[in-house]
Image (spheres, rainbow, N blue to C red):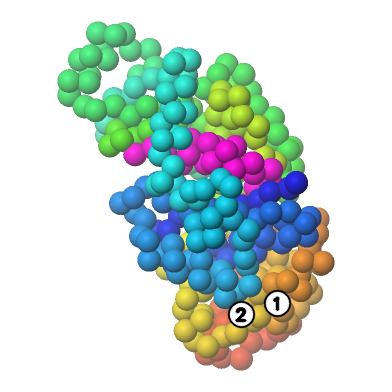
Amino acid sequence: MIRGRFAPTPSGLLHLGNAYTALLSWLQIRQAGGQFVMRMEDIDKPRSRPEYALQIMDDLRWLGIDWDEGPDVGGPYAPYTQSERLKLYEDALERLRREGRLYPCYCSRAELHSIASAPHGLSSEGPVYTGRCRKLTAQERAAREAVKAPSLRFALPNHGLSFTDGIQGPQKLPAGYGGDFVVRRADGILCYQLAVVVDDAAMGITDVLRGADLLDSTPRQLLLFEALQLQPPRYTHVPLLFGPDGERLSKRREAVTVAGIRAAGTPPEAVIGRLAYWAGLTDRPEPLKAAELISRFELSRVATSGIRVSSDSLQALFGTSPADANREEGSSPAS
């Protein structure tokens, strides 16, 4: 059976960009008659808040997006909150360590910054690590460890990687793409890349639909699936929503939140109708229930470039000005 998931980080309120991805992921699974999982990715405890987790789930249910398994309903693969699954990640880390796939990295922030400043030293996920700590001798590691606690990096294999994304199409990446990456931080916090691989495999996730900003994470995750001898899901990365200023909607930019829209008295059908219109599932932003879109969903109809959301559209959701229902939303500033 097809199984999908929505896995937010509860470090802020659910905004329209989150809701857009959640709706499309939910529709993909519901249209196929599959099971949908809610998972809270709160592994970075300093950034996560339980109250945000509760609000996110409440906002999604208000929109008409439900789930078959999750933190509040349980299920056969419980717990569905990452901070309660740390033993699984530690076991995977130990397996990688035994097989020689990890090495300690002692680079300081200043050293990593110098990497980022070098030509071609950045990927969309940050600095491309040069592997400078990979070849340290045992004596050199001992000397560095006396000064600084290390992070742990995954040593990339000497082969390239190919996969086909549901929207972005064929992806072919050379060996070493992105550089060796951190799987455990120097402060002991286990990293997203490892945790999401362990969880998707353990929960039997077959299909992952998420934002295009995570496309660069996919090669790293596929290599971890390979190293741990686990079955990877199929991936689909949908283009992002951009605000009127051309910047993508995100928590960092205090984007429009679903909680704020609710407080303005806007009905959930108005939000779903806008999201469906932006996605390309409807030809106008008419009010709709999420369930009414299930029969209409086709991945081939989903927009293939980012959508710039107009000021009028945002104002309409807050009820502060009349919306022009026929106004065209612009394409991504990157297109």
Residue at image x 57%, y 71%?
61
**Outermost residue toward the left in this view:** 146
* Magenta span includes 199: yes
In the image, residue 312 lies at what x, y percent? 59, 82
Label 1 belongs to which residue?
A: 289
C-beta proximity under 8 Å, tags 2 and 1: yes
Q: Which is nearer the N-term, disc 2 or disc 1?
A: 2
Quick one: 18 or 52, which is closer to the camera?
52
Callout 1, which amino acid? Lys
- Establish if 245 lies above or below 157: below
Residue at image x 72%, y 79%?
288
Q: Is residue 141 left or right of residue 273?
A: left
Q: Quadrant of residue 48?
A: bottom left
Q: Does dot 1 land on a helix, a strand or a loop?
A: loop
In the image, residue 188 lies at what x, y percent? 31, 35
Quick one: 108 or 154, which is closer to the camera?
154
Callout 2, which amino acid? Pro
- Establish if 106 lies above or below 251: above
Is residue 18 at all visible to an observer of this figure? Answer: yes
Q: Give the number of the disc on residue 268.
A: 2
Is residue 132 at all visible to an observer of this figure? Answer: no
Q: Is residue 57 left or right of residue 267?
A: left
Q: Quadrant of residue 184?
A: top left
- Establish if 107 lies above or below 86: above
| Quarter of the rendering occupied by the C terminus | bottom right
Q: Which residues are magenta?
A: 189-210
Crowding at label 1, few (<14), some or many (≥20) Cα neighbours within 10 Å?
some
In the image, residue 57 lies at what x, y percent? 51, 66
